[in-house]
Image (cartoon, rainbow, N blue to C red):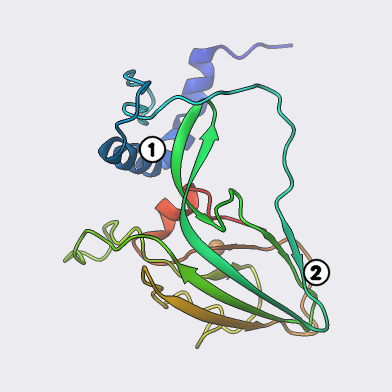
Amino acid sequence: MTTLSRRGFLRKSSLATALLAPSLAGLAIERSRSADEAGMDSADHAGGASTRGVPHAPFTKGEPLIQPELRRSANGQLQTSLRVGYTYKDIGGYRLSLRSYEGTVPGPTLRVRPGDVLRIRLTNNLPPNPDPVPVDMSLPHHFNTTNFHFHGAHVSPGGNADNTFRSMEPGQSYDIEIAIPPEHTRGNYWYHPHHHGSADVQMSSGMAVL
Ligand SMILES: [Cu+2]
């Protein structure tokens, strides 16, 4: 039996850290701008992600996993709504301000069958974007603009279906209608935002759901 030292673990996990670092740094920076609650962490932990300015929260190890809310289709359709907005979550001893579906992390599980139609009214309750569109569109921007992607599903990518080119702006509501082919394979698929410039930050914030 081998024991992995902290140093060894850090070395092994450096790739993951490097991949996660920009998103986590983004979250931490955002929090430190708006937070001035007492009991913030002043430590700047190694590994790329800073917890400076993030308020502490109670943390109990070994708490049971909580099942997300389940929404099932009936009579050939699942008609539901998803509200995108900020919520506070205590994770790992820190109180985080996160972008979420329905104020929960993760959001509700949507259960549909082959041949069903998934109809979602998505309301973006995030505040207006403070930043202009950058000259270089590949840079992170407009973190409060979202859209809806049904990952892995063999469905239409156009119109108001699984269209990753839509921009769902703060303060607006949008209808999404996705027809699932009758011959679609069963399995675990997931939904998440796919808006260029903000998808990374929103997903690492918890907007990644079955
Ligand atoms: Cu995806």
In which quadrant of the rendered view does residue 35 lie? top left
Q: Which of the four quarters of the rendered structure image does ligand 1 lie in?
A: bottom right
Q: Amino acid at mark 1?
A: Ala
Residue where numbered disc 2 is placed: 186
Q: Are marks 2 and 1 in contact (CB under 8 Å)?
A: no
Which residue is nearer to you in this view: 70 or 132? Answer: 70
Residue at horizontal 32 percent and vertical 26 percent from the top: 52
Measuring from the top left, give residue 90's x and y in whole percent.
Answer: 53, 34
**Total number of numbered discs in the rendering:** 2
The disc at residue 21 is 1
Q: Judge whether 66 appears above or below 116 on screen.
A: above
Q: Is residue 189 left or right of residue 24?
A: right
Measuring from the top left, give residue 88's x and y in whole percent.
Answer: 48, 42
Q: Amino acid at mark 2?
A: Arg
Residue lying at the far bottom in this picture: please name it: 159
Q: Judge whether 136 appears above or below 23 on screen.
A: below
